[in-house]
Image: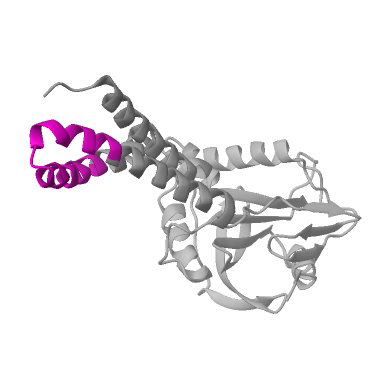
Amino acid sequence: MKLKKKHWILLIVGTVLIVVGRLFVHGHVLSAYTFGRLAAILLTRPIRGLAILSIVALVVAALRRNVRRFWFPALAWLFLAAGVLDVGVAGYWAFVLRPKEPDAGKVENSVYRNEYFGLTLKLPPDWTVPDEESQRQLLDKGIDVLAGEDKNLRAVMKASGRQTVFLLTAFKYPPGAPVLSNPSMVVFAESVRGMPGIKRGSDYHFHGRKLLESGTVEVSFPEEPSTEQLGGLDFDVLHMVMPFGSMNVKQRHYTAVMKGYALTFAVTFTSDEEQAALERILESVTFKK
C-alpha cells in the first residue's frame, strides 16, 4: 500500500487540532505544570485517539473489503474529524462555558470591593494597601521563610501561589515602618476546582496545616478549629501561633469554599488590641446575596 502525502497531512492536522484543544482546556493553568506533566497532558489524548481510531479505521476498511487500500485513508480522515470535533468542543468550553476567573478587586476611599465574590469590606482610613508588585514580593519572602532550604516544599508552595489570586493585602503601618508589630490582613483565593474533596474551609485547612508543619518555621495550633460567620456566611477558622524573637505572632485563617475557590481572610497580630482592630474590619465584611 502506497501512503499518500495527503493522508499524512490530514493525520498531522488532526494531531495539531487535538493538541490545540488540550491547550484550550488547560491553558489557564499551564504555568503550574512541569514540562513532563505538560507533555503528558498534551500528548496522551492524541496517542489514545490514534489507538482507538486505528481499530475503527480497520473496521471501516474491512467493510470495504480492502484493508490494505482503505485502512490508512480512513484513519487519516477519522483523525482529522476527531481533531475538528475536539478543538470545537474544547474551544466552546474554554471561551463560553468555563467559569470566569476572579479579579483582584479594588480599593476606593478605604472600601475594598470584589465583584466576582460579591465581597465588600471597610479598612481604617490610615491603613496601607501595597501595590500588586509589592504584594508579590511579600509572597516570595514568605515562601523563602517557610520553605527554607527545602526545594520540594518551595516548589509546592510556588505552584500553589500560581493557582492563587491575591485580592487584598493591608497593613496598619507601611511595610518596613520602625514598629515592633504591624498587624495585617491578607485576602486571597486559591482555585480548588481540581480538588473535589475540598468542600469547605476545614478541608482546605487540613492540607494547609500539613504544608505548614513540613516547613522550617515553628508553628503551633493552640486552639481547635472553629467556625464563625463573616457577612452572613460560615467560615472555618484555623488558629496559629509562630514565635518571632521575643514575641508570639498569631494568625487566624478564615476560609470558605465558593465559586470553585477557597476564599481566605488571613489576619496577623501580636496583641489583643491588634486583634480587636482586625475583628472590626472582619465585622464590616458583606457579600451580595
Q: Is residue 183 magenta?
A: no
- Residue at x 45% of width, y 51% of height: 89
Front one among 248 and 15? 15
The image shows residue 157 at horizontal and vertical percentages of 48, 44
Quadrant where the N terminus is found in the figure: top left
At x 91%, y 55%, the residue is 109
Nearest the viewer among 245 and 190 is 190
In this rendering, would 237 be left or right of 130?
left
Image quadrant for the C terminus?
bottom right
Q: Report whether residue 58 is seen.
A: yes
Q: Nearer the viewer, residue 216 or 192?
A: 192
Q: Identify which residue, 201 or 58, lies in the foreground.
A: 58
In-image side of 223 versus 105 (left or right) = left
In screen coordinates, is 87 left or right of 116?
left
Task: Please state the horizontal and vertical placement of residue 111, each as a whole percent of the image.
Answer: 85, 59
What range of the chain is rendered magenta? 48-77
> Which of the 4 image quadrants contains residue 118?
bottom right
| Residue at the limit of the structure toward the front, as seen here | 64
What sort of colour scheme is used for the picture?
one colour
Q: Main secondary structure of the magenta part?
A: helix
Residue 148, image x, y percentages:
47, 38
Q: Is residue 77 above or below residue 104?
A: above
Q: Is residue 216 visible?
A: no
Is residue 64 shown in magenta?
yes
The residue at 40%/46% (across/down) is: 86
